[in-house]
Image: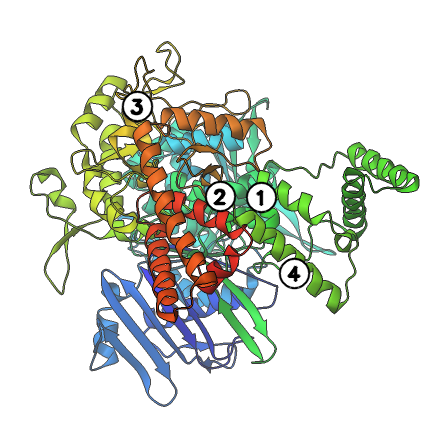
Amino acid sequence: MRIDKVHIKSKFKNLDDFEIEFDSNAMETVLVGLNATGKSNFMEALIIIFRDLELKREPQFGKKKEALEYYIKYNCRNKNIEAEFSKGNGYVFKIDGERIKSKTTFFNKRAEYLPKHIFFYYSGISDRVKELYSEHEKKYYQEIIKTDAKPENFNEIRPIFLVQNIHASFALIAFYMFREREQETIDFLKDELRIHDFGSALFILKEPSWARQGNKVDSLWGAKGLVKSLMIDILGFSLAPIATYERVHTNYKKTEKQSRLYLFINSKEKFKELIKNKYDDDKVRLFNALESLHLSDLMQDVKINVLKENVDGELSMNEMSEGEKQLLTVLGLLKFTKDDESLILLDEPDTHLNPHWKWKYLDYLDKVVKRPENTQIIFCTHDPLLFGSMDKSQVRIFNYDSEQGKTVVREPAISPKEMSVEKILTSDLFGLPSIMNKELEDKLNEKRYLQAKMISNDISKEDRKRFEALKEYLDEIGFYDITADSRYNQFLKLTSKHKEFAYRSFSKEEKEKLDRIAKEVIDEIKKVIQMRYIDLERIKSKIKKIKFTDVSKKHLEPLLFNDPKTGEQYINWEDVEKKHLENIKSLSVSEKKEYISKNSDWNILQKIMMEEYGNKCWYSEAPIGNGELEIDHFRPKNRARQDDEKSIINKDNGYWWLAYNFKNFRLSGALANKRRRDRLKENSEVEGKGDIFPLDLDNGKIAEDECSTFCEKPLLLDPIIASDVGLLTFDEGGTIYANPLIKNDFDKKRVETSIILYHLNLDQLETARQQVWSECSGVIEDAFLYYTQSDSEEAIKLALKTCAETINRRINPKADYSSVAKACLNLYRKREGYCEIIELLNL
């Protein structure tokens, strides 16, 4: 289930003629924007669309039952479905581009054409959205109270589902009570929530509003159907049930007597016995039965008690923090209800979460919930921590356009994953002018300005005294304006030389001057950054549909699918990765190594990787012969050593869980990957990457198996990280060396380590790079000579054309040693006279 496009044609709350498109490869999309721009309203519109298709009626909303005119295109069960409603034409449906003759045909097959579930979590006051679900709840309630209603008759969660606070208690049951308890779930509860086990459950039942006079607690107040069955089951497994009357407040000044029934299940074992004997260990049946208590107005409360770290005895869920309950509610309910071909809508699911949980939220969805790949998640948030790892294709910004007088949607200019939290807040995603308060920012800018004057020995005694006072203040509050990013430090250094940056309030002319200065500084920094960066996002979409031609890989045949138009067979690499991880997970260390060695299916990705970035090594940019081409695992798959000393092994079993993760693959030639001596040098040392993966263990740590690697500080540069690539440059002799802008020792050490382990200083590589430099410099020199001295217009044109064609061919990302060509070009940009030629040719 994946929505591609929605057009709300009629006015729906603050949405009018509203259009949004989703990336066809993104199964997770975040909606951001200011309050009151329509994000929640858009989710409500989606619910109305699918709700009324399920109910087989025209889409309507509000007390006046106004018609909702819309167009929606989505993919469900491998069918491209289009649905449109207008007052004039009613419903129009298309399946794979072909119009269906009547709406009855669509409605009769709605189980095939509609998502299996619409799951909605709303963090606000749920009364706002309850009316969206009231008819579904009413129909469902009428079914569960029938006399013959049994648990086995309710094997599905109802299609439109709203999460409510009571479901937090059901969530804990989902985590602990069923056979398929995954280790990731147990680890999550222990590590994040400090919950070690399920303790007990107390069901507090009350006399319902529908109970007739004479129906007492001993007859379960006349309950029928599914809810009666559950109450009898819980009674049978309860310890000393208590029936009583209690005086309760119905409002702040009135009380009344109510009949209550307390049912206590005193252990996890007892609860599991109930589930196994009465519900066939089926969590959906149990969930429907538990919810029947809530829907039937019988549940006053359910107190789930847990065993928690550093807490004596059991702790009730009611005593847990709002953040803990929110995290449990959403993740637990998704475990209960996760299913194929569903749509999950989460409206600010992070309102009570701490920054650490927000930062890891998407990881929780993947590892704890294990969302099916054909289920789409759309969520709203105001916190960049929640979506900082996402691509711009997964983000939609809601913005009110005053000229058009309506809300419009756009994709951000830069991916959140390429920005820090601070940058996200000040980007077009949120548009903050600064993340600092005005007073602090003014002090910081003044200090930087004075510091620049001091460095140039152009500072008075009064200014020096002021600088020392500002520095002392900033040190005292723990504020440091030096970052770990060497290029940002360079930007600060260069901009601080300009007085205009010392103050915050700017006129239009001053702002234009600041923009010009900043652009000049950024351009200067860009000149020393060699763009050899490998963007895996260009490959990601292609690995989902790989043409399958290797008939020797019989074990992959069950994963193949046919193109409905051509009949050709394809395979999705994500399915391959999933299959191998399932097979390898429970194996011993030696068995894992043997399995990985025998199943090198990653080779089917070689062609795609070569098509995007040419037939060259990602580490050295050297051309790769067919016999030397291989896919390297950046983090070694079988064993990871710290250095040449074989006794220093960081991970004896390697990063096995990344063995089939395409983000860990790098196209490599044997020179960079294999451990060998330089045959052209006498007595040379053995160099090459092999299974060596050195880490800075003073400032980072080794990642645990199946965990994120963010905790690690690799000493090897990674060609898929733009900032890593910018740490290297070249000279006219083909020598590779550290970027002169690098100021910190850590980055210098990374450059030195990478040059050695990637074999980047081999004589044959230096010779090849020198030849590329010589070719580029030669055509630039010729073009300059003819342009400045020749009287022949034809000769000038020929020289310029040859220069442009050669340089463009050499700086093409697919060309061998393209970074060397760019380094050469950048050098000539700085030489007097040559910059005019380069600008003229738009190089």
Residue 801 in the image: x percent, y percent?
A: 35, 63
The residue at the point 50 percent across, 20 percent down is 697
Labels 1 & 3 near each other (Cβ < 8 A)? no
- Mark earlier in primary sequence (4, 1): 1
Q: CA distance from mark 2 to mark 1?
A: 9 Å
Can residue 783 be seen by looking at this rendering?
yes
- Mark earlier in primary sequence (4, 3): 4
Q: CA distance from mark 1 to mark 3?
A: 42 Å
Labels 2 & 4 near each other (Cβ < 8 A)? no
Amino acid marked by disc 2: Tyr
Pick the residue in front: 357 or 766: 766
Q: CA distance from mark 4 to mark 3?
A: 47 Å
**Callout 4 crowding tier (Cα within 10 Å): few <14, some 14–19, many ≥20:** few
Labels 2 & 1 near each other (Cβ < 8 A)? yes
**Callout 1 crowding tier (Cα within 10 Å): few <14, some 14–19, many ≥20:** some
The residue at the point 57 percent across, 30 percent down is 315
Amino acid marked by disc 3: Gly
Q: Is residue 597 above or below residue 832?
A: above
Q: Secondary structure at mark 4?
A: helix
Residue 420 in the image: x percent, y percent?
A: 56, 46
Q: CA distance from mark 2 to mark 3?
A: 35 Å
Q: Which residue is mark 4?
A: 516
Left or right relative to 2: residue 192: right
Mark 2 vs mark 4: give the one in front.
Answer: 4
Amino acid marked by disc 4: Arg
Pick the residue in front: 285 or 572: 572
Q: Which residue is mark 2?
A: 361
- Mark earlier in primary sequence (2, 1): 1
